Amino acid sequence: MPHRTFIAFILPSALAMLIFIALPIVSVVVQSLFIEHERVMVTAENCGPFGCKKESHVDEAATAELRRDQPLGRFNGLGTYLDRKHLAAKEVREAFAEASGPIDFLTRVGSLPLYKALGFTLAYTFVVTPLVLILGFMIALAVNALPYFVKGPVIFASLLPMIITPLIGSLILFWMIDANGIIGASLQALFNDPDLSLKASPTLTWITLMVYGVWHSAPFAFVVFYAGLQTLPHDTLESAMIDGANRFERIRFVVLPHLMPLAIFVGLIQLMDNFRVFEPIVGFNAGASATSLSYAIYTDLRSTGAPLFGSAAATSMLTIIGICILMAPVLVRTWRDFKRRH
Amino acid sequence: MSVLTAKTSPWMRGAAIGFITLWLLMAAFPFVWTLWGSFKVQGDFFSRQDWLNALYGVQTLAETGSSFTGRGYYGAWVEREFWRSVINTGIVTGFVVVISLTFGTLGGYALSRSTARYAFWILIAALIFRAMPHITLLSGYLLPFFQLGVWGYLSTAIIVLVAINQPFTIWMLNSFFQTIPKDLDESAMVDGCSRFQAFRLVIIPVMWPGVITTGLFSFLLAYNDFAVTAVLLSQENQTMVPKIASFMGSTQVQGNVMFAVSAVVSATVPLFILVLFFQRHIVSGLTAGAVKG
């Protein structure tokens, strides 16, 4: 295809991505180097019968004007990256100096906002992704064994958790696990503990969010694996049976290797999607005990008063770097494949 | 798959059926339960005495004189004007799907027919863009949009969603167009068509299965989005999902939770219908990327 034709075809799509994805990244980089203006203070001498007092107050008009003239704020260099809300250089150094052992160090660092968010994001990503693969595979095997006429309805019902809006799905579960909801109340009855609440303890909140994550994504893995099972090599399976392989050996040595490329695909997509975990934290109202990187950016942008653009941008940059590190092995592999083909 | 299931012991079969029943319960029951509960009052759906009240509707009967009530729906749709959000969602998703597909088919077609190295780099860039959490981009948009005075409008959200959608759309359509033999459009060009004529006369008639599938996923992305619409739309232009989130802000008020429950059920209905009619497309779309991956 001549370059000119190619450009004509790709232009709308490329422009959209350039203006609304690439340019915003530049904007994020720039914003992350700036910080909100400090309020303009004026000092006035106030003289009364008991002598003069110096009082300072915020000059609202001047502050507003300054904000209007320089909406970016003032230049802060890498200051925002290193402050307590982000990489917290000083706090980490202190923790390193004072900590009694590695566990103490991790606990101290883990209570800093960014590391807390990173901790949950990574824990969520690396717990949910493998569980989704396992559950999806099990559902695919079980559905595959069902008689033909029930498969359709079963697949229909199985798709629902995936197709549902994440925020809505998490709200639905949130209401059910409410202390007065069906699951919450049943759990209280089951453990005979009227104070049991899935929302109160951080650990239980983490587990709830992860259960939601698996519930939401397992159908995706199931559908992909199920389609993979339809293309199983029959000859290999039959010869494995003739050679005396039992059911588990057949799954282990024939089915799993056949599904491996699909598992890598699902795992990759899940890695990307779980790393951006956000809606369930809003839906489950779990911000107090579990924050993710995306959630931290969201709260900065929605913070009451003025949005904290600098802080949100710095967290965004760190998130983008994080996802690039996570994706690096995949990108390298794609590049090698490409070079082999050309 | 007789080969896999042959010689299954009844025990094995029972375990599989038990497992699938459990999964179906997990997958579908929350929706059934919420649908049922949306016709009750808060005192039943969140009963302090006994969750079984939600089944019988004890409070609902006492408060409204019947065991089912549409109060939640009335509150959400009429009092809190949920219908506005429904219309907004309709506008946003409609435009996002149409524009995404237009841009995406052209781009995806070009990528599938180009052997140049830059085509590969565009796909890789798209993959990285696809991996980036949407909210990181939002912090890039917000300040410029405020400055340009374009914040809060539906059209802004639409174009942003189209752009966020593009990486996925061109990947999917690229792999779809690769399944259409190159000979088809090339022979048209030998016969004297220009590249664009070949696309219009030869490719467009055969591309609909792939376009419909991709369109479904574009629809889902626009419909299900919370981050973009919550941050970029003003109060009066809110779509359904941020509107539901704003219902949750005042949960303490009696009755308000039921507004949210009814709104949630209302927003779920189109998705149900979508799966009902397009189950096959969704399944094939999910697997298309994987198989050709």
Image (tube, coloured by chain):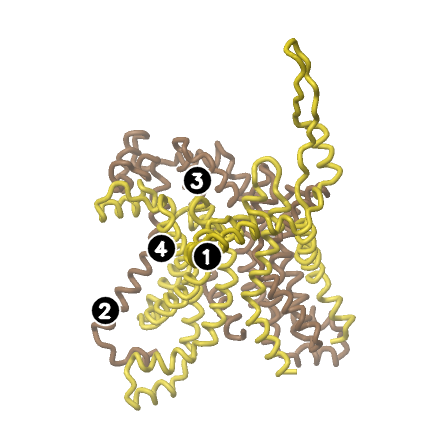
Chain colours: A yellow, B brown
List the residue tagged with mark 4: B28
Marks 3,1: beta carbons within 8 A:
no
| Kind of residue at badge 4 | Ala
Q: Residue furthest top?
A: A49
Q: Which residue is mark 1?
A: A163
Residue B25 as seen in the image, left or right of residue B271: left
* Res B15 quadrant in image: bottom left
Could you tell me how far apart the alpha carbons at marks 3 and 1 are, in whole angstroms?
19 Å
Q: Quick one: label 2 or label 3, which is nearer the N terminus?
A: 2
Query: How many numbered dots are placed on residues in this image?
Result: 4
Q: Between marks 4 and 1, how big is the CA–CA gap?
A: 12 Å
Task: Tell me the quadrant of the picture where the C terminus of chain B can be found.
Answer: bottom right
Mark 1 closeness class: few <14, some 14–19, many ≥20 residues within 10 Å: many
User: Residue B260, labelled with which disc?
Assistant: 3
Q: CA distance from mark 4 to mark 3?
A: 20 Å
Up the image or down, A333 lies above or below A79; here it is: below
Q: Which residue occupies 70% across, 59% down? A: A18
The numbered mark, 4 or 3, whose residue comes first in the sequence reads 4
Can you tell which mark lies on residue B272? none
Q: Are marks 2 and 3 in contact (CB under 8 Å)?
A: no
The three-letter amino acid code for the residue at tag 2 is Gly
Left or right side of A327 for B6: left
Find the distance from the CA under tag 2 to the CA under tag 1: 29 Å
